[in-house]
Image (cartoon, grey):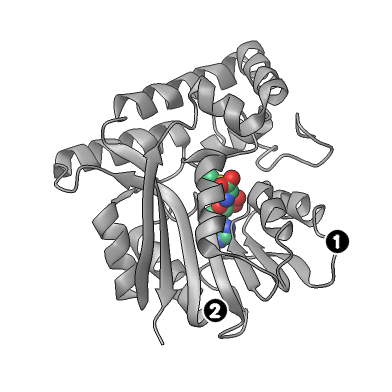
Amino acid sequence: MTTLHDEHATPGAEMKAEKMPGHWLLARLGKRVLRPGGLELTHQLLDALNIGETDDVVEFAPGLGITAKMTLARRPRSYTAIERDEDAACIVRSYLSDASHRCVVGNAAATGLPDGCASVVYGEAMLTMQAPHEKERIVREAVRLLRPGGRYGIHEISLMPEDIAQETIDAIGQDLSQVIHHGVRPLTQSEWSRLFKMCGLTVRHAVTAPMHLLEPGRIVRDEGLVRAIRFAWNVLRMPDARRRVFEMRRIFRKYENHMSAILLIGEKQP
Ligand SMILES: C[S@@+](CC[C@H](N)C(=O)[O-])C[C@H]1O[C@@H](n2cnc3c(N)ncnc32)[C@H](O)[C@@H]1O
């Protein structure tokens, strides 16, 4: 099946709407920005990473390549993306025009790239969906790729407050995993920071923002008015997809006092 928003195959297109992971369902409906803090937090991420012409950048899980385009506009010396989904990787490749740009189908936990090949590594909306040991493997892989002093940035879902009850954490994980059809395990800000420190990163920057992925105002800001209307139209005309999107939004709203988007930047210790 071709995507509703361009000529490439939609990731997960072979699955039925009621079965596919939430992010690919949103993509099929025409949504391109799939990260919890929206483009606003992505701009802050790229500014804080301070990507410039001397940087060798590795992006984990670029999805539909929205941040890839923003990064390439900063003209880094090289750009390498590691994306698990082949259809998504094809979409990202369509944005790459230089010999120093590539998108590899692979696992961010074991990229096969050489030690110290990057000055900047980042990934958005991809660690939260990993089991605890996979989160650690991916952060350690980022650190392995970085040269000393290199920067690693993430944009993920954070739990709040810090002393959130374990039963609330369990309920959030269970409800999110059920509506998204993929394991989802957010951490508190201090747990994200601890993971960074454990893997050899010094936290340099942390920002949180509301988790408004499916709120109308955020959708218009992230997608623009025309795409937002097209997305709404697609949601309304497909009953299976509509049920799932409304259910995702219901769960996001149910836990809005306990979930936020987080941006964290760490620096590799010498
Ligand atoms: C929610 S989407 C986010 C995409 C994009 N980063 C964004 O923020 O719009 C999750 C992405 O992570 C990718 N992914 C998940 N686990 C991965 C892994 N271990 N290695 C590489 N990519 C992975 C998926 O294929 C998908 O493209």
Quarter of the picture holding the C terminus: bottom left
Residue 129 appearing in the image: no
Left or right of 17 on screen, residue 159:
left
What x and y, as percent, mark residue 4? 75, 29
User: Dot 2 corresponds to which residue?
Assistant: 145
Residue nearest the observer in this picture, 90 or 195: 195
User: Dot 1 corresponds to which residue?
Assistant: 97
Neighbourhood count class around disc 1 (C-alpha, 10 Å): few under 14, some 14–19, many 20 upward? few
Q: In the figure, 83 relative to 15: above or below?
A: below
Q: Hey, what amino acid is under mark 2? A: Leu
Q: Secondary structure at mark 1?
A: loop
Examine the image and state in which quarter residue 233 appears. Answer: top right
Disc 2 within 8 angstroms of ligand 1 (CB) = no
Q: Secondary structure at mark 2?
A: helix
Total marks shown come to: 2
Q: Earlier in the sequence, mark 2 or mark 1?
A: 1
What x and y, as percent, mark residue 39? 57, 41
Left or right of 61 on screen, residue 209:
left
Q: In the figure, 138 relative to 148: above or below?
A: above
What x and y, as percent, mark residue 157? 39, 45
Residue nearest the observer in this picture, 259 or 44: 44
What x and y, as percent, mark residue 25? 60, 32
Q: Hey, what amino acid is under mark 1? A: Ser
Q: Are marks 2 and 1 in contact (CB under 8 Å)?
A: no
Examine the image and state in which quarter residue 71 appears. Answer: bottom right
Quarter of the picture holding the N terminus: top right
